[in-house]
Every structure is written in C-alpha cells, then in structure tokens.
C-alpha cells in the first residue's frame, strides 16, 4: 500500500522516504514547540513569539543565498549537511535555559533549515528528469502531510504527560528524525555543482524582476493556508452555529485530500502554460471557498455544517492547484545553473505569506465578518488572475525560452 504513495524507485523515492521521516519530526515540533518552550524551558509567551519571528526572518533572508551555495557546491551534499546541522541544533534545544540561548540556537537552526530547503529544489532539478519534477514535488507534499500527521499524534502522547522528561523525549525524537533523513540521502548519486556565468551578479534570482513578481503573487496567494489553520477555527467558534469538533474534521479532510490527490492534481503543470492556468483556477477556487465560509455564518447548524464542509472541499482543490502551479512555474523559469537560488527565492514568497497571514486573515475574516471574507475572496481571485500575465512576462525574458511557450501562457 505504501508504494502507491511513493514515486518510482530511484532519486524520487529516496527523497520521498527522507521527507517522510523528516516531517514526522516537523509534526512533533509544530505541535509541541510552544509548550516545550514555555512549560519546560520557562520562556514567556512574548519571548517565544519574538524568537520565532526572528528565526523566521533569518530563514527568509537566507533562502536565496543558501540556494546559491547549493548550486555552487553541490545540492545533495548541501541538503545532507543542512539536515545534519539541523539535527544537532535541534538537540541543543534540550540545553536551552534562557531567551538569549533560545535565540542563538533558533538562528543557527534557521540557517541550517534554509540550507536544506534551498538545496531541495536543486536536488530535484538535478536528479529528476524535467518532466517529472512537478510530479516529484507532489509526491513530497503528500508524504509531508503523512509525516506531519504521524508526528502530531506522537507529540500528543508527550503533551498528555506534560513533564520535562516527555518534552525532552519529543525534542530528541525530532533531532533523530532529521539525522535519519540525512542518512537516507546517502545512497543517492552525488549531483555535481553547476558552474554559473563567469561575470555579472551572483544572486541573479534577487535581480530577476519578473520572477520576483511571481514570487510575491504566489507568496500572497499562500496566505490561504492561514484560512484553514487560523481564521476558520476562530470563525466557527465565534460566528457560526456549527459544533467546534468540526474544526478537526475539516483539517482531516484537507490532509486526506492532499495525500490522495496532490499527485493527480499536478498533471499538466509541468509546462508554464498549464502551471499558469492552474494558478488562475486556484484563485477562483479559493475565492469561492471564502464565499462559502462567509455564508456559513448566517444559517442554522445543518446549513452551517454543509457550507463549511463544501467550502473546505473547494478550498483544498484550490490548494492542490496552487501548489502544483507554483512548482511548475518556479522550475520552468529558473536557469539550469541557478535552480538552487531560484527555488530558495521561491520559498521566500511562501515565508512572506506565512508571516502576513495571521494578521490579515484574522482581521478580515474574524474581525470584519462576512464582508471580510468577501474582501479575501476578491483578493485571491485577483492574485490568481494576475499570474498568467506575470508568467508570460517572465517567460519572454528568458534567454532561449521557446516563443510558443512564452506567448501561450494565459
């Protein structure tokens, strides 16, 4: 059964198994980090929030430079070293006793994580045929959801104990998964570094205005992840007659659909034309989901539940298209010698969306109510609609880009 959710034997399968193991630890950290840092380390909520914000900013700034290093020194080795460094710094959290110590370890972890993430895209570009890159990313996203779900369950056992020993055990498991994920990569054939042009700027991704425009649009579109995780639970609890346990059901529906259908939804997005159209469809679907969510606040319980479930299903379809579109566009626009730094720059957009989402979606959806959901719907539709034009602009600026590809987008 497991092989049905893994790529064919080879580099793609090795990456998928490594991702599955690594994301088990990520699920543990996402679930247990706040309580570990407050109840076990003794930090205040404000200190935890500040520390996580600083580390997120460090990771954002370091993404493209770390991708550049992956291009120049070999992405497989960079990814492996990034995972091993993350394992060591994660384990060092056990010794943290103060905010300065937490900040130091957090910044170091953010840098190693940026190295791992910046190299991952270059590893896929170097080890997987071009027509299989988006499909491989789809498999990795499906396994990521499985891994995080497993980690969440494991973390729940430790949280139930609520002891120092339990939290330390969870952190130790997280560190171990990172180390094992690195070891799994060893059988993969080394990917030689790619020599860049001998002249001109090195971080060309940060000077590529069309690509940066796409990155910003895609990053803003990624704020929809905050709808399900942040806005919708608050909306259900404060503005609808739906039972609160429905929140867990909707999260389960989202995870299940991604695991089962992300690979299928990625079909046709390997080329820029299909990817740009998928981005437009994603905006329409997510906008429609916002309207369904808004309508759920005006009806009795059965109506509210029906609208929320329908909204979650439409939302996850948009999410599938959005993810696949981003992979196809980011791979398609990146020069062969700079896949690492371009994938790192692409990741910066997602991080930007993650930083803006909590404030924006709660203010609009929860604070403004139904009118706020309408504003979000229009925003996502416009973000999706703008991407084909931006991709067409970017495609025309690529040296050697086929003319038909450049003109047909949109």
Image: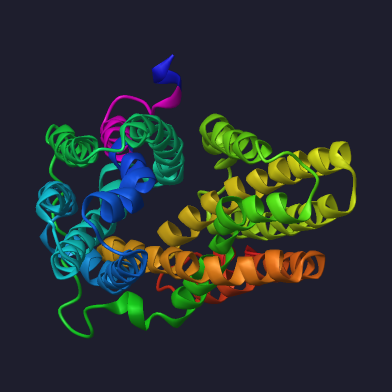
Q: In terms of image quadrants, where is residue 227?
A: bottom right
Residue 334 visible from this viewpoint: no
Specify the quadrant that holds the N terminus: top left
User: Hey, which residue is sitting farthest top in the picture?
Assistant: 1
Say how the picture is coloured.
rainbow
Vertical placement of residue 307 versus 276, above or below: above
Comparing 368 with 381, the one in front is 368
Span colored in magenta: 5-23
Q: Residue at x 79, y 50 (%)?
A: 240
User: Hey, which residue is sitting farthest bottom in the picture?
Assistant: 200
Q: Position of residue 8 (x, y in %)?
A: 36, 26
Instruction: Residue 374: say if magenta.
Output: no
Magenta-drawn stretch, dominant element (helix, strand or loop): helix
Q: Residue at x 68, y 37 (%)?
A: 246
Comparing 161 with 220, the one in front is 161
Vertical placement of residue 321 versus 67, above or below: above
């Amino acid at each position: 059964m497991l092989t049905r959710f893994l790529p064919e034997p080879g580099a793609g399968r090795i990456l998928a198994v490594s991702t599955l193991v690594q994301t088990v630890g990520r699920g543990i950290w996402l679930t247990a980090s706040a309580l570990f840092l407050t109840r076990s380390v003794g930090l205040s909520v404000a200190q935890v929030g500040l520390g996580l914000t600083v580390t997120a900013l460090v990771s954002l700034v370091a993404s493209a430079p770390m991708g550049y290093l992956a291009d120049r020194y070999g992405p497989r080795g960079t990814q492996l070293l990034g995972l091993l460094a993350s394992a060591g710094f994660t384990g060092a959290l056990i010794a943290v006793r103060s905010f300065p110590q937490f900040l130091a370890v957090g910044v170091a972890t953010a840098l190693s994580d940026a190295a791992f993430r910046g190299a991952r895209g270059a590893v896929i570009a170097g080890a997987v045929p071009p027509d299989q890159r988006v499909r491989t990313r789809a498999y990795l996203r499906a396994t990521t959801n499985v891994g995080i779900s497993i980690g969440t369950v494991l973390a729940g056992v430790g949280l139930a104990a609520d002891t120092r020993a339990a939290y330390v055990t969870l952190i130790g498991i997280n560190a171990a998964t990172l180390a094992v994920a690195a070891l799994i990569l060893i059988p993969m054939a080394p990917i030689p570094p790619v020599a860049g042009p001998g002249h001109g700027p090195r971080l060309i991704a940060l000077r590529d205005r069309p690509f940066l425009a796409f990155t910003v649009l895609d990053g803003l579109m990624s704020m929809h992840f905050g709808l399900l995780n942040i806005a919708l639970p608050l909306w259900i609890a404060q503005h609808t007659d739906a039972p609160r346990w429905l929140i867990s059901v909707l999260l389960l529906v989202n995870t299940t659909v991604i695991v089962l259908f992300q690979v299928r939804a990625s079909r046709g997005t390997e080329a820029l034309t299909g990817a740009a159209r998928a981005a437009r469809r994603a905006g329409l679907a997510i906008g429609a989901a916002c309207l369904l969510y808004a309508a759920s606040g005006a009806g009795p319980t059965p109506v509210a539940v029906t609208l929320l479930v329908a909204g979650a299903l439409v939302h996850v379809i948009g999410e599938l298209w959005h993810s696949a579109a981003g992979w196809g566009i980011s791979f398609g626009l990146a020069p062969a010698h700079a896949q690492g730094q371009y994938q790192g720059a692409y990741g910066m957009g997602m991080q930007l969306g993650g930083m803006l989402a909590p404030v924006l979606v709660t203010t609009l959806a929860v604070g403004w109510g139904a009118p706020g959901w309408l504003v979000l719907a229009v925003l996502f539709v416009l973000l999706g609609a703008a991407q084909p034009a931006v991709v067409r602009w970017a495609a025309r600026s690529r040296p050697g880009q086929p003319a038909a590809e450049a003109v047909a987008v949109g």
